[in-house]
Image: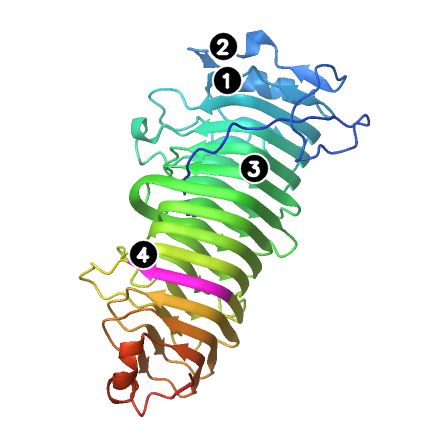
Amino acid sequence: MIAFIVLSITNKTPMTVISEIPSQSSERLSPTNDHLPEVDDRIVEVPNDLLQENTINSSDNLNAFLRQCQGKIVLFPSNAKFIFDGPIIINKLTDITIDFNNTTITYPDGYTGWDSLTIANSDVFIGNSLISVSDSDQIDIRRLILDGKKDAIDLLDLCVAIWIQDSSDVRMFDCEIKEINYHGIVIYDDTPGLLFDNLVLTNNFGSQNSSDVYISNSESSSADFIDITASRLKLEGNQVFYINGYNTTITGFKAYNCGTGLDYRKGTHTASDIYMENCNAVLYIQTTTLEEIADVTINNIQGINISPGTNTNTGLGIWSAGRVRLTDVVLEYSDDSDTALWGMIIRRFNDDYSIKDVVITNLTISGTTGSVIYYKNLDESVKINGLKILDYKNKLFRVEETTASQIVESLQLPENYFLILEDEIVDPDSKIEYSF
């Protein structure tokens, strides 16, 4: 059985459209275009008899139509809502742009799962997804709203908005995924060249194993995320991004009322401009395979009003990693918590794991109720270049079972804390080397 994990988001400005269509069918559409031209020989409208509001439409009929549209721009009616009796399946297709035109696709009332979880006459798994993309190339999806109707669906019927597997150059622009009770997006197996630009994830959470974006791709895969916004009506849920795969880039990610923002398990990844407000954790790096420890580089991370969750007691945790570079990190904790909240935890799960090369530059922490930095079971040095503590209620450093010296340079404390630093905060046996 394949297991997965998912997330949610606030509405942005109205979804944009394509402005200029290339004259050659082999050319891809630019994500910077603003509107569709009124005339273009590549545009085909979905026939009216395939799409009716206030009734259940046949996904088989729509899928048959899409199979005839390679090299075309498929245009849906504007701002409509359509219910289908099965998933929209894009399988073994090349060079299609589907502009949903701000139309909503959703499950039927009383949904209890699709009749089949695989594509007919194949072993291609689609799960309970609204849209499945498999064995395809150069697929553009634009201005789509996927509504999982989670409050009207039994939680046992775990739903996925879009499933992408063994496909290349799949791109989504200006789309919203909302009210999904399991995973918003699943990216699986060999998926190079994926792009998600202006993706909104709204109130996606149900199963305790859910994530907004679940990635379990291959080493030859890649996925870029630009301007991603996730939100929930109240603070709840697991990860927005669960990344148990390879080669992701995240540029601009905002989350509100979400449990954990980024959870990396293996592979090489970069991210920048991360903002989370009212959350349980901003970043976790916790390798689950001994052979494939994570390599993560992130610039500009900000977590505001961090509070403890069911399984979280820090806003930033590194449990095992091959290489980590974090720059310009701000963690502001909710100071009214009765539970110990550590500013950052760096520890190995056990002696078989390792934390090899961790450097954090310009780290600011405030509002912790536990120790500001908690080191445990480390046999290599972690270096912090610039640690600014605005306030704290406990010891600065807590160190356990650690043989290597931990290095903190350019330590800054509130003025009234300097007098007690030597007596109260640093244990002589703690193996901390610090300088002001």
Cβ–Cβ under 8 Å for marks 2 and 3? no
> Range of the magenta residues?
327-333
Mark pair 4, 2: CA separation? 45 Å
Numbered disc in front, either 1 or 3: 1
Packing grade of label 4 (10 A; few <14, some 14-19, many >=20) is many
The residue beneath circle 3 is 124
Quick one: label 2, few (<14), some, or many (20+) residues within 10 Å? some
Distance from disc 2 to disc 1, alpha carbons, whole Å, reads 13 Å
State which tag comes first along the sequence, 2 or 3: 2
Q: Nearer the viewer, mark 4 or mark 2?
A: 4
Residue type pointed to by label 1 = Asn
Residue type (three-letter) at the residue carrying disc 4: Ile
| 403 over 45 or under it: above or below | below
- Give the alpha-carbon distance from disc 1 to disc 3, as whole Å: 31 Å
Which residue was labeled with disc 1?
Answer: 79
Please tell me which of labels 3 and 4 falls first in the chain. 3
Mark in front: 3 vs 4: 4
| Closer to the eye: label 2 or 3 | 2
Q: Residue at x 56, y 7 (%)?
A: 49
Q: Which mark is residue 234?
A: none
Residue 77 appears at what percent x and percent y? Answer: 56, 14
| Quadrant where the C terminus is found in the figure | bottom left
- Residue 116: image location, x then y, percent: 47, 29
Give the residue number, with chain letter if any, for mark 4.
Answer: 306
Q: Amino acid at mark 3?
A: Val
Residue 179 x/y as whole percent: 38, 33
Tell me the CA gap for discs 1 and 4: 37 Å
Q: Is residue 247 visible?
A: yes
Q: Which residue is mark 2?
A: 52
Q: Secondary structure at mark 1?
A: loop
Q: Amino acid at mark 2?
A: Gln
